Image (cartoon, helix red, strand yellow):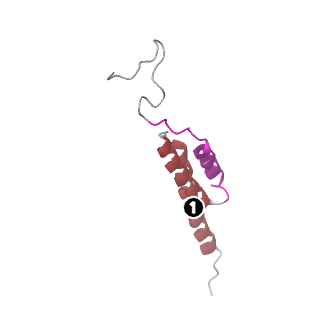
């Protein structure tokens, strides 16, 4: 009367356990966003930062390691800084003195 019925031997409880909600299905979207973010290093670094941060949040919500997302947004920051430095160098070297 006080205990729920037990499953037959060899069968465990349902995925979520008794009275527990089932875990959310895992999505491939964070991986896709991270890879697109890495590709964006070469054409649009700010977009790679945004995509990496969004992917990192999705990885964390799913309880997965977020290394690929970190690579995307940190690489985007590095690419953006290098772009700024090279742009400043290019304009400072092409300046003519009067």
Quarter of the image where the C terminus is located: bottom right
Residue 84: image x %, image y %? 57, 66
**Left or right of 91: which side holds 64?**
left
Q: Residue furthest left?
A: 2
Image coords of residue 63 (percent x, y): 47, 40
Q: Nearer the viewer, residue 75 or 13?
A: 13
Identify the element where label 1 is drawn: helix
Quadrant location of the N terminus? top left
Which residue is the extreme one toward the front? 1
Q: Is residue 62 left or right of residue 5?
A: right
Magenta stretch? 21-43
Residue with the most extreme bottom position: 98
Measured as percent of width and height from the top left, residue 24 is found at 52, 39
Specify the quadrant of the image occupied by residue 68: top right
Circle 1 packing at 10 Å, graded few (<14), some (14-19), many (20+), is: some
Q: Is residue 51 above or below residue 97?
A: above
Residue 29 within the segment the image draws in magenta: yes
- Eyeballing the image, is 63 above or below 96? above
Residue 45: quarter of image: bottom right
Can you identify the residue that label 1 sits on? Answer: 80
Most foreground residue, 64 or 18 = 18
* Percent x, y of residue 77: 53, 58
Residue 51 is drawn in which quadrant? Answer: bottom right
Relative to the observer, which residue lies in front, 77 or 63? Answer: 63
Residue positioned 65% across, 50% down in the render: 36
Instruction: Give yes or no for residue 32 being in the magenta stretch.
Output: yes
Q: Residue at x 64, y 81 (%)?
A: 96
Of all residues shown, which one is farthest toward the top?
9
Q: What residue is rendered at 61% in x and 49% in y?
A: 33
């Amino acid at each position: 009367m006080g205990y729920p019925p037990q499953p037959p031997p060899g069968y465990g409880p349902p995925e979520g356990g008794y009275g527990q909600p089932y875990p959310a299905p895992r999505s491939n979207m964070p991986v896709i966003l991270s890879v697109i973010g890495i590709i964006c290093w070469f054409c649009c670094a700010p977009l790679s930062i945004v995509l990496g941060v969004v992917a990192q949040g999705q990885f964390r919500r799913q309880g997965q390691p977020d290394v690929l997302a970190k690579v995307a947004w940190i690489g985007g920051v590095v690419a953006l800084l290098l772009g700024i430095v090279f742009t400043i160098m290019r304009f400072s070297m092409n300046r003519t003195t009067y």
